[in-house]
Image (cartoon, helix red, strand yellow):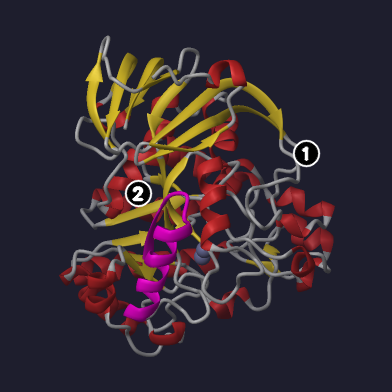
Amino acid sequence: MSLVITGGRVIDPSREFDGKADILIDDGVIAEFGKKVRGSGDTLDASGLVVAPGFIDLHTHLREPGHEHKETIATGTRAAVAGGYTAVCAMANTEPPNDERAVTEMIIAEAARNGACRVYPIGAVSRGLKGEELAEFADLRAAGCVAVSDDGKPIANAQLMRRALEYAAMLQMPVVAHEEDLHLRDGGVMHEGFYSTLLGMGGIPAASEETLVARDVILAQLARAHVHIAHISTAFAIDIVRNAKRGGVHVTCEATPHHIALTDETVQSFSTNFKMNPPLRSAEHREALLEGIADGTVDVIATDHAPHHFDEKNVEFDLAPFGVIGLETAFSTCHDRLVRKRIIDLPRLIDLMSSSPARVFNLPGGTLRAGAPADIALIDINERFQVTNTFASKASNSPFIGETLQGRVVATIVGGVLQYDLRKPKQAKKKKK
Ligand SMILES: [Zn+2]
Ligand SMILES: [Zn+2]
């Protein structure tokens, strides 16, 4: 089974390519890349479209096992391909948590059966996510985990974090850190600042994130290990990472589309779709995040896709769970807010969503080189559309409903198979066997 993608503007950040090229896919891998490539099978006309390596999300909550009323591996990966993602890394805070081999194996088996894209499990740092004793990283690694994290919770105990970093380093895995001092959060529900005072809501200070980022950068240096800071959101946290990188510490970090696009001002609507953790920060923090993206301090854009059931979110702001979905709108949001606003160019955005995540977690993909898996996103950067409350995800807790965005993924190919196709019938016609 072969397929030639012709006539598109191909952007492959893995080798700084941006130009017209054809791509021949054969047997699930990229067989040939260049001008006037021919194949014996189908042709996909990509004229007018951008052809990019499929996106890789380092931070997805698929909710299965245990919370299938929120999302499943099947629906979460459907949402992924609808956003141009060809691989997602599944966080460990399921029920039971992914703290042992059997759970990792179940996730991989279910993804192979019903998944629309690749799924790379992330194992738990601590047994039961309790923050007390380490999980068996070697077992998790052998079963297919690509990183470890207790995401959803911080590792409060610095000694446990040190041991986790040392153990993970032996296995060449990053520790993904959800940075938050729960004592400083102290029941807060939104960013501590002008709007939390105005609205009379409990604040989460920037310091609750920054203190742990500082600690973990120091511990990563001590352990000579790789710490990956999840969903970075404050100005000082970005400064800490920037300085640590200069000092040679192996630290990487990710930013979410919602922290890139939105501020705490939106909480005035009292919509629980603006409640997430870390919270939407003030405009100054958002500016610092954009600077960190522009200067390369931020390595990756990751969604922190956190689906919740409508009934769980349909309560008072104080009582609602933290988290928003993001897979289906990530590219459009970031294209609209970063590329159209000239913070970064399109090849750099594609790098932040595909090639760079592959490098940071050492995953296959993120490239269109011959021999690579045929994981590809086709993008129409001129299409404007309004985000509605209809999603491929089981959940609809998106902070972007109602927004008009420009730039949209129109088709996604995973391992040579068209897993998502939004193209008009005219563009979609191919078969000429
Ligand atoms: Zn988190
Ligand atoms: Zn998360």
Query: Please, which residue is most extreme toward the bottom here?
Result: 132
Q: At which x and y percent is residue 49?
A: 48, 19
Q: Is residue 301 above or below residue 279?
A: above
Tell me the SS state at disc 1: loop
| Amino acid type at mark 1 | Gly
**Disc 1 packing (10 Å; few <14; some 14–19; many ≥20):** few
Residues 217 and 57: in front is: 57
Confirm whether residue 312 shows in the render: yes
Picture quadrant of residue 122: bottom left
Label 1 sits on residue: 402
Query: Please, which residue is most extreme toward the left here?
Result: 170
* Left or right: residue 313 compared with residue 416: right
Query: Please, which residue is most extreme toward the top here?
Result: 36
| Amino acid type at mark 2 | Arg
Q: Residue at x 67, y 47 (%)?
A: 391
Q: What stretch is highlighted in magenta?
A: 100-121
User: Is residue 109 highlighted in magenta?
Assistant: yes
Q: At which x and y percent is residue 270?
A: 82, 57
* Left or right: residue 1 compared with residue 409: left
Residues 380 and 229: in front is: 380
User: Is residue 398 highlighted in magenta?
Assistant: no
